[in-house]
Each structure stands twice: as C-alpha cells, then as structure tokens.
Image (tube, helix red, strand yellow):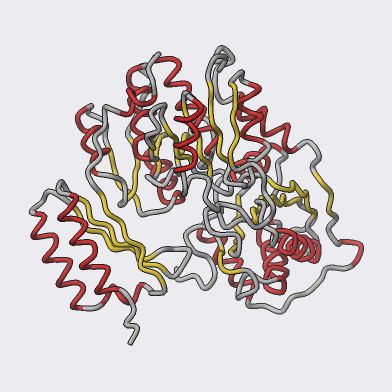
Amino acid sequence: MSRKYFGTDGIRGPVGGHPINAEFVLKLGWAAGRVLSPSGGGTILIGKDTRISGYILESALEAGLASAGVNVLLLGPMPTPAVAYLTRAVSAAAGIVISASHNPYADNGIKFFSPDGQKISDADEERIENVLAESMTTVPSAALGRAKRLDDAVGRYVEFCKNTVPTSLRLKGLTLVVDCAHGAAYKIAPAVFRELGAEVITLGCEPDGLNINAGFGATSPQALAETVVREGADMGIALDGDADRLIMVDHNGEIVDGDELLFVLTEHAQQAGKFRGGVVGTKMSNHGLAQALAARDIPFVRADVGDRYVLAELNQREWSLGGEGSGHLLCLEQTTTGDGIVAALQVIKAVRERQESLATLKAGMTKLPQIMINVRNVTARVLEQPELQAAVNEVEAALAGSGRVLLRPSGTEPVVRVMVEGEDERKIKAHAEQLADLIRPNED
C-alpha cells in the first residue's frame, strides 16, 4: 500500500507543517478513534516524550478521540515501549505515542499500538487514512469520550522492567552511567537501575522541551563514553528520546552498537542452553554479525529496515531475538516491542551471569568497516537514475564479493542513506562518497 501520511514508524514531520499541526492531529485522533474503537466507548492511552510540542498534539488528539466517543488515559512523558506495555496492561483499545524518537525537538510524530502492545497493522493504518478523507463529525454529547490521567503509570512500568530479569539478579556493586537524551525515560530509567541496586550516574536527564537528543543519547553517545571512563564506571547506557533504542558503552569507553549487543544477547542465550530458532537483523546489519552467528551455527536473516519489519519476520518464524544496529532491539521473551531499558537489563544479565565484562563479551564479533552517508533533501526517485545504478554496479564489482552496497530512502524524513561495507575502510569510504555525490542535489 502507498500511504499518504504513515511512514515506517507512524506519522512524523516538522511541527507546524503538514501533517504535524493541531488541525490535522485533531482529525487524526477522530479517525483513529473511529478505526481503533469502532463501537465507541473504548479507552485509548496517550503518552509522549519531552518535546514542547507534545502539549499541543496531546490536546488535539484528546479532543479528536473524545469527538469520536473514545475515552482517553493520559500518561504524560512516557517511553514508547511503556505505552505498548500499559496498553496491554489496562486492556485498552489502543495506545498512542507522541514522539519523533531520535529526531531533533522541532520534529514530532504520532505512532499507534494495538491492544496486544505491537505496532498497528498496515491494514489499520490504511483504514485510518481512509477515514481521514471523510468529513469530521462529533458523536452526541452524551456519548462524548472522557479524559483522565493514569496516575501510577510510572510505577507500573518501573516494576514491569524490573520483572523482566530474575529476582536473583541484583546490581549491587555495579556503577552505571545512564544517558536518557533529555527524553521520555529521564525519570524511569535511573529509577529502574537504582532499585535493582546499581550506583547510577545520570546524563541527559534534565529535559526543557527543546534539548531532546541534543548532544546526548543513543544518537550522540560520545558524552556517555567520556563519562564512563572519567567515572570509572562498569558500563554506560544510552537511550534515545523515546527510549526504544539502546546503545551501550563498555568500561573502556568503547561504543557498543545494536549489532554487537544483539550478538552478546544471542551468544549468551546459546551458552546458557536457552537459545532457539535464529536471529533477525536488517539490510543495514553489519556483515560481521552474520559471520559471527554463522560461526556458531545460528541462522540469521535480514528484514527491511525498521523494527516493525524485524518484528514481522520474528513473528513469522516464531523466533525471539532481533534488532538493528541503530539500537532497536527486540527481546520478545520479555516484551512485545523495542525497549531500550529492557534490552539493557538483558545485556547486564549476560554480563553478570557470565562474570565477564561487556568488552569481553562483544569481542566474539568483529565488525566489518561500514560507511554510511545521509544525503538530505532528496527523495527515493533519485535512486532511479541510470547513472547512479551504473555506478552501484561498478562499486559492487570492485568489492568483488567482499562487501555490500545499499542505497535506502528513509521512511521518516527526506533522506537517502548510502551504505558501503567492506574490508578496506579507505576504499569503501571513497566508494560511498562517489555514490553520495551522484545523489546530492545540484545546487547550481
């Protein structure tokens, strides 16, 4: 299906533009209420990250849902995976998250969860878009939805996270630096690790509505790496603005990305005799992950980029572990969606049970050099140029089977990502620059 508004992770864009404005989001709430609670009278949860625009969009969604006869439970600032969990926990008709994830504060977005805590289906997204094309109506006054706050939302989710690891796992003696990107987990993540016994040093836990993801978090882990080394911490944990991504730092200050964390989790499960099935990555997953898993006779398949596609592949194969190098990690034995806090707890569990450092556990995988260049202000149409296709063929021939080329349009912004992977970093960087130059807009 070709969607007008929905991308790979909901609806996203600059605040004040179309579609992320109060007028559109009001109607979006109404359309979502009509589709996700068709008989009216159901309850839909709304959570948000810490962007200042969340207030506007929350109010617009609330009004739209109430106009459709749907009740609303307001969660306030809450990680995306917390909304997924709470949607299941309170038997809601759906959950809505107001967040642009790792994007800057001037962007925002809307994404939806089904009653089982998973992203809504393509079919439901299509139904919402179809209803958006209709004229908005309001149910009779007696049938209007009501709104209230779920006051214990934070405590419920903290307890859920703690219960994803055995009660015997205590983190006493462990020093963690926790970077919340000034985002939705700024209260929750430090509480989880402290209540499990760790000494916690916080970064990025002072949101002001404008500083989300700015120089901190999973997309900017350098400050975390420096703090881990300076404080002599055992590990660092970096979440993004809505806390569904996880990047970690070992005690040496080395960044451990999603591919490496997925390897650590998989190998630990195999060593413990608890691994079943295989692992799902994406087209962007480092080939070093595939090689390390193959050496351990663990099947590995690549899905399209986006955690919804990883999840679909996992469900189809009845596997439980998958993820992306960006830090979206799916641990389906613990939860239903990508969850940075839950994934971090699983990594820490592996470290404690193996009695090894994160640096040692990740050493079983050797990453191939991978260069990615984001070319901005271009659309997918540029990939149809014959000159570009010919250049890709030339680069692939030059790599001679020892690397990969992937050109991929972003599903959330006007960006084309150029990825070249191979054994010689100098050569693949030159190849990536060559392809990016062909994609960049002509400024003349």
**Residue in the picture at 21% in, 33% down:** 294
Q: Residue furthest front?
A: 230
In the image, residue 152 sits, relative to residue 275, either above or below, namely below
Image location (x, y in percent) of residue 226: 46, 37
**Residue in the picture at 46% in, 43% down:** 221
- Figure quadrant of the C terminus: bottom left
**Side of 287 where 227 appears, left or right:** right
**Side of 164 where 45 appears, left or right:** right
**Residue in the picture at 45% in, 16% down:** 352
Res 386 → quadrant: bottom left
Of the pair 279 and 216, the residue shown nearer to us: 216
Of the pair 223 and 34, the residue shown nearer to us: 223
**Residue in the picture at 77% in, 60% down:** 62
**Side of 117 where 421 appears, left or right:** left
Image location (x, y in percent) of residue 346: 48, 27
Image location (x, y in percent) of residue 35: 66, 62
Q: Residue furthest bottom?
A: 444
In the image, residue 72 sits, relative to residue 336, either above or below, namely below
Image location (x, y in percent) of residue 58: 73, 59
Of the pair 6 and 21, the residue shown nearer to us: 21
Q: What is the total number of numbered labels drawn onto the structure image?
A: 0
In the image, residue 54 sits, relative to residue 332, either above or below, namely below
In the image, residue 18 sits, relative to residue 121, either above or below, namely below
- Figure quadrant of the N terminus: bottom left
